[in-house]
Amino acid sequence: MREKVKISEKHLEEINAFLLDPNNKLVNDLLAVIEKYGGVDEINRKAEEAGKLENILGKLREKKSPYIKDLEWLTEKRDKNAFISIKDYRRKVLGDKADSMQFNDENPVTLEISACQYFPFLMTEARHAVEYGELMPGRIIRVRTMKEQEADNDILAVSAAVKIMGASQCETLDTKGTDGSNIQLGGAETLAGYTGGIGQPNDYPIKWADEFLYYYTNYGIKQVLNINFGTILVGYLMHELGINNEFKISVFLGNDNPYYFFVTFLLAKLFSREDGSASLIGLNPSNSVTNKTIQEGSAIRKALGFEDSVRFEHHILESQKSIVIQPYDRRSELVELASTVKNVSAKHEGGDIETEATREHVSDILEYFLPKDEIGSDLMNLLLQNYMDKHDAVNHTAKTLTEHGLSFVAAKNLHK
């Protein structure tokens, strides 16, 4: 009976024949947009140059950006080891016990914060971390409008800061159904849509590829969020064609059971390069998954060769409004998960529940979509407070992991 589930070589041949058909519009449209940017080699060359720290800083100096002083401060503090070391952090949490305690370094949990919308928020966090001996996240997720952050040089400043910190970042492109293209959305308040998630309808996969290649070649932005199987396939195909792009799959795709995990990794495997690599580097499981489901998904990930390259980015806390039923807190489950599953990040999209309960203005995911020019100074201060609550939650998670003998990944260049 089991033999009947084997994928037929005949069916694979039919798929390849479809992909290689000179009249295949799906492939032809993608090849056309790649040629628009000069072809694979030129795209990768431009992206590598644009992503170099010295070139990013050079652009900011040319623009006479006030952010240069902040970045120089961050570099100075990094070079002077002003941020707490991992050893000292463990001693701060555990006292003398830290010197004899054995830590599980096989499954370190990446400390992740979302969303860091504005460069000044990141700098406030960094100064706070130096003053109070706290940790900066090892991974930063951004959801701010790309054109808006390009206009005020935020995109350059955050990219530079992340490189100085030794962290990773993921941006969210503007080409998605929230711009009105998905007629099922009545605005951001119906974020997930009535059917099919946020959506990237009709010709949007090619628009998505075009937008990605613009930011990749001009700013070296390599890693973006992916919310739709159409753009996921485009991301795989670009990588297979030779472009060194990366993406992570959003929680909105809904990977919520082991069969769904298999479909996701199956597609990655089918369109991986000869060396086995694919452009998929992260996967946000659905908020409804249990530890058992993630463990089963991890077995699938390992079987198909993606355990080391694809991180499970698990929401530990969520925004208080507009996303999940509260209270939502998975920190205690993370302790169990981290001891059994490799390559996991702890994503903090909200503050600790106890902290949020004291705030007149709680975290709200819909505020990610507010244009900057509609945010007054009072609201901006409240949004900064919400962000710093997430920072505190990140450090709470690091403390909990440390108390259980578990390791974490903070900003590597800052916390040595």
Image (cartoon, rainbow, N blue to C red):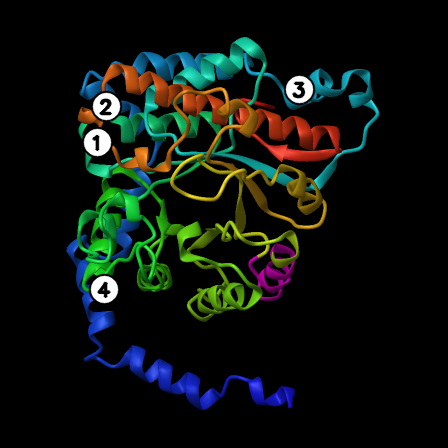
Closer-to-camera residue (243/84): 84
Q: Amino acid at mark 1?
A: Pro
Q: In the structure shown, which secondary structural element does the residue marked by tag 1 occupy? A: loop
Q: Is residue 296 magenta?
A: yes
Q: Residues within 10 Å of mark 1 (few under 14, many from 20)?
A: few
Closer-to-camera residue (375/411): 375
Image quadrant for the C terminus? top right
Q: Amino acid at mark 3?
A: Tyr
Quadrant of the rendered structure where residue 227 is?
bottom left
Q: Which residues are magenta?
A: 294-306
**Mark in front: 4 vs 1:** 1
Q: Find residue 375 and name its label.
A: 2
Q: Is residue 249 visible?
A: no
Q: Is residue 221 visible?
A: yes
Residue at screen point 62% across, 37% down: 331
Q: Earlier in the sequence, mark 4 or mark 1?
A: 4
Compared to residue 134, the image places residue 3 above or below, namely: below
Q: Earlier in the sequence, mark 3 or mark 2?
A: 3
Q: Find residue 371 and name its label.
A: 1
Q: Residue furthest top?
A: 131
Residue at screen point 31% across, 33% down: 367
Residue at screen point 77% across, 16% down: 95
- Residue 329 image point, x, y percent: 58, 38
Secondary structure predominantly adopted by residues drawn in magenta: helix
Q: CA distance from mark 3 to mark 2?
A: 36 Å
Q: CA distance from mark 4 to mark 2?
A: 38 Å
Q: Residues within 10 Å of mark 3 (few under 14, many from 20)?
A: many
Q: Are marks 4 and 2 in contact (CB under 8 Å)?
A: no
Q: Are marks 1 and 2 in contact (CB under 8 Å)?
A: yes
